[in-house]
Amino acid sequence: MVVSEPAPTNAPNNGSGCDDGVGARMSNTNNSNSAAPIGSTRSAPSLHVTPHCSITSSSADSNHNEQVPNQNNSTRLENVPAVSEAENLNAVDRNGQQKKRGRTTLKDLWSLPPEERIVVSANHLGQPIGPEAQLLAGFLGMLARTGQQIGIHYESWHKVPKTLKDELFKFIELRFALEISKEYVLKSLGKKWRDYKHDLKKRHFKREDGMQVNKDKHPNTTIRWQWEQLVDYWYSNKGEDSERLGVASRKQQKYTHTSGSKSFARKEKEMEVHNGRKVGRLEFFKATHTKKDGSHMNVETEQIMVKANEKLAECETVDEDMQIVETEILTQVIGKERCGRVRGLGLGPTLKTYYGGTTSRTSTTSSAQSSEFVERFNQMEQQMQQLKEEREQERAQREEERAQECARYNALLGFLQTRFPGVTIPGVDPAGSTSQSQITM
């Protein structure tokens, strides 16, 4: 089954049909001749959930001369990438009984028995982990790229009607037993939707070609009326302002990661399994911002690691406190968190969920644990400051002792100067450097 979003009636009717497979159909319930404007807050389209409908190829509209090419407002099964797959998955039946699944692809998800769902587990921050997370990410990517599910004509993810988002989440739950929050799922879906629009613009839009030319060369994977409204938005003042802000924002990004398409949560879990212990934030930052040959992504990342390692070398702590120490060090070298998110952890964690609070689907961190974490964090910060002050005192004391030694040595030189004229003897200045002194009578 697929959730579908209707197009305005002046958009071509693609005539998608349903048989006994899995797929989507377009609902055309509005008889007006006006297309929904970009980012419109029109009443949310009803999502027709049709179980066991196959995705059919597009057919020509009897009222139009052209056939919409290979874009029946849905994702054709033969175009689903088979590389998005996972093995040894956890699943659950309608009675809550756990079971294992072998190799499962995105195509297989469409033909899952109605009583079977893939179990997606979460880490302590409410992020999906395990091979099931990879399959969920691919599934969300498919929805984000399917115009009948989420139209590309909306100005932003915030403009997508809440009712549509709710129906999409219900549809996702038909395939997955989620231990992660609805908020996370929709946030991930929204990011993939934005990335898809960015990719379309990068590949198929050239501002200098003019509006009509860009409208005429709409990609096969898009719905024409949605593409045309999206082009209208890109040429609008608001769209151009948004583009300038986006370019400026990307130029300010200093710490490009090397994790690729693998989520940070999955990467962290793999490191924990491999190392047999928890991974500190500084250790994880290094792992996700270093190339395979050990080199850094850029100068900024290298400077961060140099400063962090210097601070880490000054610390004297036990393994159980290392996570807190690394969090404090990373905060010092990259600055305090902004915009409510925690950097270097991937999608999901916020200041509240990381330093205190719980996730909404499963309580990944109890209030007591959060309070304890904050308390230990503050204690470690005080201990680090105390250690720094003690080291400064020790350094000052060593310098004073060195100066006294130099003074005694130079006094001895003065004595020898009177006893052994013409002999070259090394002298030491108060700073500790050695020089050759010609001793004469």
Image (spheres, rainbow, N blue to C red):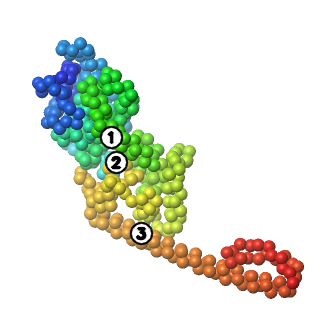
> How would you rate the neighbour count of disc 3 (Cα within 10 Å): few for under 14, some for 14-19, many for 20 or more?
some
Where, by quadrant of the figure, is residue 397 drawn?
bottom right
Q: CA distance from mark 2 to mark 3?
A: 27 Å
Residue depicted at x 26% and y 37%: 155
From the top left corner, tell me how far across and down residue 119 is, in percent.
Answer: 28, 43
Please tell me whether residue 156 is drawn above or below residue 362 in the rendered image.
Answer: above
Where, by quadrant of the figure, is residue 67 drawn?
top left
Residue depicted at x 50% and y 72%: 388
Tag shown at residue 97? none
Q: How many labels sit on residues?
A: 3
Tag shown at residue 347? 2
What residue is shown with label 1? Answer: 241
Q: CA distance from mark 3 to mark 1?
A: 42 Å
Tag shown at residue 381? 3
CB within 8 Å, label 1 to label 2:
no
Q: In this orientation, does residue 139 appear?
A: no
The numbered mark, 3 or 1, whose residue comes first in the sequence reads 1
Instruction: Identify which amino acid the numbered label 1 is placed on.
Output: Asp
